[in-house]
């Protein structure tokens, strides 16, 4: 199970007021890299003070590579290794990839970059992506909000982070642009690793909340069944009388 988050640089000429600005096929826009942690979803527990967990977060950055192709190749090897492990395990499962907003940004970007730098052709890319199972917390998080309309719309990354970790400050992803221009690479990495850490914590918060809701649901069903049984017994007694 991979928890990850990517960063991108978009030159001023390509920036929009809203929406995702980066396009892997657009000239001068740059894939900077990102951070990830491989976790065992059934066993790993999250403690906000768990230094061991934080130390397990790894990063891959463009400034540590000779070019974008080398950077993309490292991410390709990471995902390919997870697919291969699942195939070897022969348990009929696929690698679980988890993040916030990754269905509409990070995953499509990586697939495009794998094609762009010839790690996969179009046929192989479809098979590769289909071998992954995407768990996007921006979609899963909808259920934890009182939505004002009947439209269920995915939540933004900062919207989720600020709701579940209000004691923390999470900057907008656009701050990375100025940090990159000013060569503040360490700040980019620190910010990115923090987001991965809190994404992992959010996953476990969601998991606990869902389990709690299921417990409440089961107790409610048992209570309703008990009420129904008592009512039926009461009716039977009356009929006998």
Image (spheres, grey):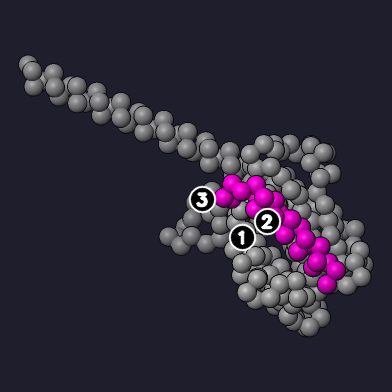
- The disc at residue 143 is 3
**Residue 235 x/y as whole percent:** 14, 24
Query: Which residue is painted at 71% across and 72% down in the image?
Result: 120
**Quadrant position of residue 188:** bottom right
Lower sequence index among marks 1 and 3? 1
Between the C-alphas of marks 1 and 3, the distance is 27 Å
Whether residue 39 is visible, yes or no, is yes
Total labels: the figure holds: 3
Q: Is residue 4 left or right of residue 94?
A: right
Q: Which residue is mark 1?
A: 131
**Distance between the alpha carbons at the discs numbered 1 and 2:** 7 Å
Relative horizontal placement of residue 126, taking residue 230 as reference (left or right): right
Look at the numbered discs 3 and 2 and tell me whether their residues touch, using CB distance below 8 Å.
no
229 over 59 or under it: above or below: above
Q: Is residue 175 visible?
A: no
Report helix, strand or loop for mark 3.
helix
Q: Where in the figure is residue 134, as x and y percent of width and height?
A: 61, 57
Query: Is residue 90 part of the magenta span, yes or no?
Result: yes
- Residue at 86% x, 63% y is 61
Q: Which mark is residue 83?
A: 2
Q: Earlier in the sequence, mark 3 or mark 2?
A: 2
Quadrant for the C terminus, please: top left
Left or right: residue 201 compared with residue 228: right
- State the residue in front, 158 or 51: 51
Q: Are marks 1 and 2 in contact (CB under 8 Å)?
A: yes
Q: Residue at x 41, y 30 (%)?
A: 219
For marks 1 and 2, the one nearer the N-term is 2
Chief secondary structure of the magenta portion: helix
What range of the chain is rendered magenta? 69-93
């Amino acid at each position: 199970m991979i928890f990850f988050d990517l960063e991108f640089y978009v030159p001023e000429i390509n920036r929009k007021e809203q929406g995702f600005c980066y396009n892997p096929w657009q000239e001068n826009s740059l894939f900077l890299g990102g951070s990830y942690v491989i976790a065992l979803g059934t066993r790993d527990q999250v403690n906000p003070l768990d230094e061991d967990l934080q130390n397990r977060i790894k990063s891959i950055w463009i400034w540590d590579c000779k070019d974008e192709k080398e950077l993309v190749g490292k991410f390709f090897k990471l995902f390919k290794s997870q697919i291969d492990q699942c195939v070897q395990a022969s348990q009929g499962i696929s690698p679980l990839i988890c993040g916030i907003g990754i269905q509409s940004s990070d995953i499509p970007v990586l697939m495009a970059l794998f094609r762009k730098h010839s790690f996969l052709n179009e046929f192989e890319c479809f098979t590769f992506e289909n071998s992954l199972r995407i768990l996007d917390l921006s979609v899963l998080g909808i259920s934890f909000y009182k939505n004002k309309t009947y439209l269920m719309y995915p939540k933004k990354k900062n919207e989720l982070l600020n709701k579940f970790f209000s004691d923390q400050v999470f900057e907008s992803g656009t701050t990375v642009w100025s940090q990159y221009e000013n060569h503040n690479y360490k700040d980019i990495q620190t910010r990115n690793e923090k987001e991965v850490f809190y994404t992992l914590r959010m996953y476990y918060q969601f998991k606990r909340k869902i389990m709690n809701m299921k417990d409440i649901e089961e107790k409610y069903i048992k209570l309703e069944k008990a009420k129904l049984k008592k009512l039926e017994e009461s009716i039977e007694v009356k009929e006998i009388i």
